[in-house]
Image: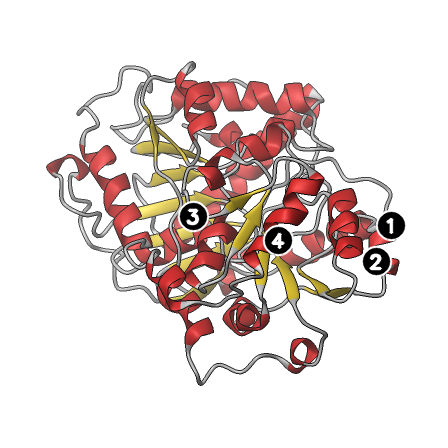
Amino acid sequence: MQLEARTEVTSDLATVPAPDIRRGARLRGRDILCFSHDWTGDPLSKTHLMRLLARHNRVLWVNSIGYRAPTASKRDLARVFQKLKAAAQPIREVQKNIFVMNPLAVPSWGLPAVKKLNFHLLRFQVRRAMRKLHFRRPLNWVFNPAAGLLAGALGEERIIYYCVDEYTAFSGVAREALARIERDLLDRADLVIVSAAKLLESKRSRRASTVLVRHSVDFEHFRKALDPATVVPPGLAGLPRPIIGYFGLIAEDWVDIPLLVHVARSFPRASLVLLGRVTMDLGELASLPNVKVLGRKPYESLPAYCKGFDVALIPFPVSEVTLNANPLKCREYLAAGLPVVATDIPEVAVLGQCRIGRDRDEFVRQIAAALEQPGPRVDTSEKMQQESWDSRLEEVERHLARLPAENDDIAGVTSGSEQTVRV
C-alpha cells in the first residue's frame, strides 16, 4: 500500500469526459495505458508518440515486464536487482501527464504456473495504479507483446497492438510461449499497427485490422548536427579521420561483429566509432587499434556526435529479426545530414536514400563511395524535413477513427467490463 500512499496526481485532465474516438477528431482527454520498454531507455517510436499524446491525454507508462528469461550472467543478475529495487518506488510523473510505474513480474513465460502468477500479479499492480490515477475506460497501447497477457483484463475501451519487431525471433526468448501470448493479443486487439512491410504480411494473416505506419524522426533535434553552434564532443573530435560511426544498442540481434571487423581492417587509417549500450562480447573487434567503443550517450548529445561522423552505419546481421525491423536510426542519421551505409534491410532500402551492401566486400565499397562526399550535408538532411511524429500520430488517429462502434471480437470492452482472459 506504500505505492498508493506516496503517489500524487497532479494532472488537470482527471475529470475530462472521454470523447468518442470515432468522430475523427484527434485524441483528447483520454486515459492511455502504454506497455513498453523502460522509460529511461533510449527514446524510441513509442516514446515519441506518447509524448505527443500526453499533450492532451494522460498516459500511464508501464515499464518493461520483460520477455527474455534472465541468465546467470552478472549483467542479467544486476538487471533483476534493479527491477526489484524499482518496483518499490512510487509512481512518478516524469513529464506533464506521463506517469511511470515499475511493475514486478517473473521474467519467464514458458511455464503455465508462472504465466498465471504473472497475470494476477501484473493485473493487481496496474489496476491499483489506475485507481489511484482515476483512469477509466483507457485505450490500451501494447508495444510489448508479453503484456498481451493482460489485454482485455483492465476495463479497456480499445486495445491497440503496436508491433515494431518480430519479438519471437529474438535470441534468449521462450519463443513458443511468447508466440501464444501474441496470437491471443492479435485476436483481442481492435487495431494492430506495424512499422514494417514484412510485419504487415505476417500479422495481417492473423488479424485483418492490421495497418502499416512506418517510423518517423525527430527532425528538429537531429538537424542540429548542421548547426554551426553544435560542438563535436572532445572524445570524438581528436580521432583520426574519416570517422565511420554507429549509434544504438550493441547486441547480438543487431550488430554483425565480423562485418565490423572487416570494415575496421579495410579502413586502417579511419576511426570506427560505436556509441551505445553493449550487451554482447565484442571479441576481436574491441582489440583493433582503430575501433573506439564509447558507450551509451544521452539522446540530447547524439546530433553533436553525428556532426563528427563522416558516414553512418547500420551493420545489422540479415536475420528474421532485422528483416522485420524498421531502424529508427536510419531516419535519424539522414536528418543529421549523414550518408548512410546499411546491410540489405527492406525498410532501409525502401527509403531509397541509403547505400546498401549485400555482402561484406560490397559494404566496404559503399562506405568508400560515401566517403567521397562525407557528411553532414544540408541536402541530405532536407529530404527528411517532411517526416514528423505529428504526422504519424495523425495517421494512427485516422485508423482509430475508422473502427466500428462495436467490436464483436472483444466482448464487453467498449462497455468497460472485463472479458474472460486465458492464462
* Label 2 sits on residue: 286
Where in the figure is residue 403, as x and y percent of width and height? Answer: 21, 27
Q: Of the residues under marks 3 and 2, which one precedes in the sequence?
A: 2
- Percent of width and height locating residue 213: 34, 37
Q: Secondary structure at mark 4?
A: helix
Q: In the displayed structure, would residue 318 be above or below residue 270?
A: above
Q: Identify residue type, mark 2.
A: Ala
Q: CA distance from mark 2 to mark 1?
A: 6 Å
Camera sees residue 120: no
Three-letter code, disc 4: Ile
Give coordinates of residue 175: x percent, y percent. Answer: 66, 23
Q: Residues within 10 Å of mark 3 (few under 14, many from 20)?
A: some
Which residue is denoted by mark 3 in the rendering? 353
Q: Assign the N terminus to one quadrant of the image.
A: bottom right
Q: Circle 4 is placed at which residue position?
A: 367
Mark 2 touches mark 1? (CB < 8 Å): yes
Q: CA distance from mark 4 to mark 3?
A: 14 Å
Using the image, determine if residue 123 lies above or below residue 239.
above
Q: Compare marks 1 and 3 and give the one earlier in the sequence.
A: 1
